[in-house]
Amino acid sequence: MRGCECQSTAGFAHVSCLARQARIYYEECDENKYGRRFGYHARQARWAYWKGCRLCEQHYHGVVACAMGWACWQTHLSDPEPELCPEATMIDRYVNKMLAASLPRSKSMEVLGDGLCEAGRYEEAIQVLRAYLEVLRRTEGSPVASGLTEDILRVQNNILLCHSRLGRPCLDAEREIYAKRAQLERLGPTHESTLLSANNLAYALLKTKEPHDRAEADALLLESSALAEQKHGRDSEIFLMLRWTYAESLFRFNSDASVENLVEAEGVLEEIAEKWQRPMDYGKSRTHPQTAQVLKDLATVQNMIAGGRAEMRPRDHRLE
C-alpha cells in the first residue's frame, strides 16, 4: 500500500514490512542509547518510521497512517512496564512514572491515536489519546515531570483537533494550549508547535462565524505569519499553513467577501499550491490530501471571482 509521497513504484510496501523496519530502527536507537545521549527530541526521533516514510521522509496519511498506528500498538503491546522493588524511594517512583509515560507500550497509544485521526476516525482517536494523556498526567507535579510538558500539550492539541473536525471546537482550551506553548522556555512564541497552536486557535475562532471572532483570528494569523516568516522563512511549511488559514478567512468564513478579498485569497492559494507541488522541496504531490484540498479551494475561489465579476459588471455599467 502507499500513503506517502514516493514516486513510481517506490512507495508501495506491505504494512508488515514497514512495521518491521520501524521496530528495527527503534531498537537500534535504543541499543545505541540515542535518546539518553541527546535528550527529549532524540527520544521522539526513535518513532520516526512509525509515522513517516524513510525514503521520501514525509508523514504517512490516510489509511496507511491508521494501519501503521495499529501495527505500532500491536508491536509494542507486549513490552513490559518497569517494575520497582518495595524499598524504592519516592523519587524512584516519580522517575518510574515518567519512564512509563515514554515507554513503547504507552507511546504507541499516541501513534495509534494520531493514525486514527488521519483516517478520519475521530471519536476513536479521542478515546485512545485521552488514555495516553492520563498516563502522561501521572507525573504532573513531580520533580522530574518537566520533560513531559511538551508531550502533554501535544496530545491535548491533537485531541482538540479531533473535536474541531467533529464540529466541536473549544476556544478556551485552544487559547490555553497556545498560551502555555508561547510561555514554555523550550518552545516560545516562534516555535513551530506554538505557531501551529496559533493556527488551530485561529481556525476555531473562524468556525464560530462571529464577526468579532473573525477579526481576532485575522489579527492572530497576520501576527503569527510574520513570526513564521521571520523565524522559519516564507517557504516553510508552518508559514504556508498559516497563510492557507488566512485565505480561508477571506473567502470561506467571510459572508461579505468582496472581489478584492477573493483576489487576495486566490493569490495566497496559488502560491501555496505552486510550492506544495514541488516534490523535491515539500514531498507533496497533487494527490497529497493537503495539496488536493488547496487546489479545490483555489478552484472554488476562482469560480467565486468569475461569478462576482459577472455580477458587478451590470452595476458598474449602470453607474457609468
Image: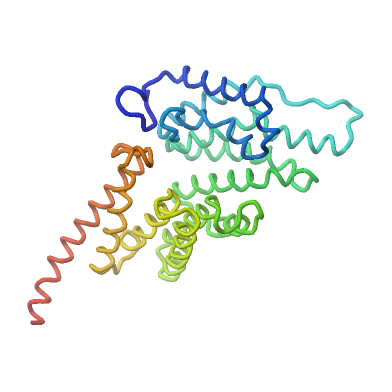
Relative side of 219 to 128, left or right: left
**Quadrant of res 203:** bottom left
Q: Quadrant of the N terminus?
A: top left
Residue shown at 60% from the left, 40% from the top:
130
Q: Can you give x and y, in whole percent of width and height, for residue 241 in the image?
A: 41, 52
Residue shown at 64% from the left, 45% from the top:
152
As drawn, 184 above or below 261: above
As drawn, 28 above or below 176: above
- Between 135 and 168, which is closer to the camera in this rendering? 135
Residue shown at 47% from the left, 32% from the top:
52
Asked which colour scheme the image uses, the reply is rainbow
Q: Quadrant of the C terminus?
A: bottom left
Relative side of 286 to 315, left or right: right
**Quadrant of res 175:** bottom right
- Between 228 and 80, which is closer to the camera in this rendering? 228
Q: In this view, which residue lies farthest toward the bottom?
A: 320
Q: Can you give x and y, in whole percent of width and height, for residue 38 in the image?
A: 67, 36
Q: Can you give x and y, in whole percent of width and height, for residue 90 in the image?
A: 87, 38
As drawn, 240 above or below 210: above
Residue shown at 49% from the left, 47% from the top:
161
Q: Can you give x and y, in whole percent of width and height, for residue 64 in the image?
A: 42, 28
**Quadrant of res 111:** top right
As drawn, 140 above or below 201: above
Relative side of 269 to 219, left or right: left
